[in-house]
Amino acid sequence: MLAHTGGVEIRLDGGNAGGAVRVGNTVRRGAGPWTPAVHGLLEHLADRGLAGIPRPMGVDGQGREVLTFLEGQTVGSAKPWPGWVHADDTLVQVARWLRSFHQAVASFAPPAEAIWRMGGQWTPGLIVGHNDAAPYNAVWRDGALAGFIDWDMAGPVPVAWDVAFTAFSWVPLHARHVVAEEGFTD
């Protein structure tokens, strides 16, 4: 457990599931029964060399999970989304990152008692997917995908489900009025 650093808390934009604050080079956000499983997943991914993920640092004195801050630009609560979301190269970068993530997570077998926010139990043949690799959880730096944040929805799914959700999030497959609000115009 980490002690409270006394640093200045800066509210981060976005965060539909409770929000988050930045304290120095860390992010603090509400923990749940799924937090130990997610931290175990993030540690596994870090051990496998996956870039572009926050690193778990424990829980602070207020019971919030503590993660490293992933520097860069995010969509936040902006609508329409910034142009980089719709750039042709964006989908290529997201797909490459997702493939690297799926390769790194393939060897992760969570403990049987792992609790996931969306439920489910891992069995062989499933992966623990990010389950929310959407534009609002992407971080961009210098015109390139720096990684993904907000891992609290991670949980056991078939690879195809994680790929399908990611495609649904990045390609204008939603209702016409929703994708128009997000800035997809073509």
Image: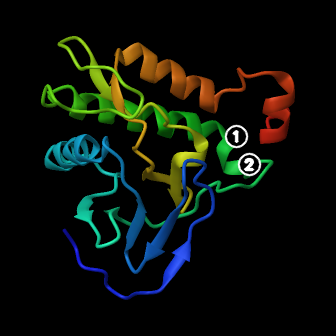
Find residue 118 and name its label: none
Q: Residue at x 61, y 23 (%)?
A: 168
Q: Which residue is mark 1?
A: 86
Q: Quadrant of residue 184?
A: top right
- The answer to whether residue 164 is left or right of residue 107 is right
- The answer to whether residue 117 is left or right of residue 104 is right
The Cα–Cα distance between marks 2 and 1, rounded to whole angstroms, is 8 Å
Q: Which residue is mark 2?
A: 81
Disc 2 to disc 1: CB gap under 8 Å: yes
Q: Decide: is 120 above or below 9.
A: above
Mark 1 surroundings: few (<14), some (14-19) or many (≥20) residues within 10 A: some
Q: Nearer the viewer, mark 2 or mark 1?
A: 2
Residue 9 horizontal/vertical position (percent): 49, 80
Q: Quadrant of residue 34?
A: top left
Mark 2 surroundings: few (<14), some (14-19) or many (≥20) residues within 10 A: many
Q: Decide: is 19 above or below 104.
A: below
Residue 75 horizontal/vertical position (percent): 65, 54
Q: Amino acid at mark 2?
A: Trp
Q: Quadrant of residue 19?
A: bottom right
Quarter of the C terminus within the rendering: top right
The number of discs equals 2
Residue 157 horizontal/vertical position (percent): 35, 19
- The answer to whether residue 100 is left or right of residue 44 is right
Q: Residue at x 26, y 20 (%)?
A: 121
Q: Amino acid at mark 1?
A: His
Residue 18 horizontal/vertical position (percent): 54, 54
